[in-house]
Amino acid sequence: MRKKKKTEVYALGRHISLSADKARRVIDQIRGRSYEETLMILELMPYRACYPIFKLVYSAAANASYNMGSNEANLVISKAEVNEGTTVKKFKPRARGRSYPIKRPTCHITIGVKDISLHDEYGQIFSLKKPRWKN
């Protein structure tokens, strides 16, 4: 039995204090893009969600270079997903002895990085996502 060569590496961020919808707005922009282009996009976007996602992309690239010996120029974001995590619930005291619930949503972010210099199991090369402005 032939052993498959591992071509995809992951980085997981769990319990990030951020709404899943706000993180998905950023994740949808980087899915399918190259590693270097992703870093530029995340540095220039004005959202608070960019910094934890930037750290995860950087960590996934470090995992790929350490575990597979991949070059960072050949990396592509193949999988990027956001799931809702637990909600931190607190109560804030209000007027007349009442309390008001405060809900802080968290999310789990998974970034998968694939090396395009390695072919997949069908012998095809992983294709890059075209920018929208090049249509």
Image (cartoon, rainbow, N blue to C red):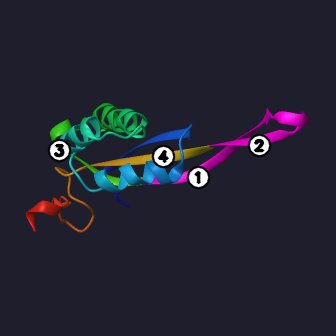
Q: Would you say 10 lies left or right of 19 here?
A: left
Identify which residue is drawn at 90% across, 34% down: 97
Marks 3 and 4 sit apart, C-alpha to C-alpha, by: 22 Å
Q: Which residue is mark 3?
A: 74
Q: Earlier in the sequence, mark 1 or mark 3?
A: 3
Give the camera-side residue of 93 and 58: 93
Give the camera-side residue of 3 and 27: 27
Magenta stretch, main secondary structure, is: strand
Identify which residue is drawn at 26% across, 35% down: 43
**Rendering coords of residue 58 (x, y %):** 33, 33
Q: Earlier in the sequence, mark 2 or mark 4?
A: 2
Q: Are marks 1 and 2 in contact (CB under 8 Å)?
A: no
Magenta extent: 81-104
Kind of residue at badge 2: Pro
Kind of residue at badge 4: Ile
Identify which residue is drawn at 79% across, 36% down: 91
Q: Which residue is mark 2?
A: 101
Marks 2 and 4 sit apart, C-alpha to C-alpha, by: 26 Å
Residue 98 among magenta residues:
yes
Q: Earlier in the sequence, mark 3 or mark 4?
A: 3
- Note whether 8 is above or below 59 in the view shown: below
Give the camera-side residue of 86 and 45: 45
Marks 1 and 4 sit apart, C-alpha to C-alpha, by: 9 Å
Marks 1 and 2 sit apart, C-alpha to C-alpha, by: 19 Å
Residue furthest toward the left? 134
- Note whether 57 is above or below 29 in the view shown: above
Q: Are marks 2 and 4 in contact (CB under 8 Å)?
A: no
- Note whether 1 is above or below 73 in the view shown: below
Residue 66 among magenta residues:
no
Q: Which residue is mark 4?
A: 109
Which of discs 2 and 3 lies nearer the camera? The answer is 2
Marks 2 and 3 sit apart, C-alpha to C-alpha, by: 47 Å
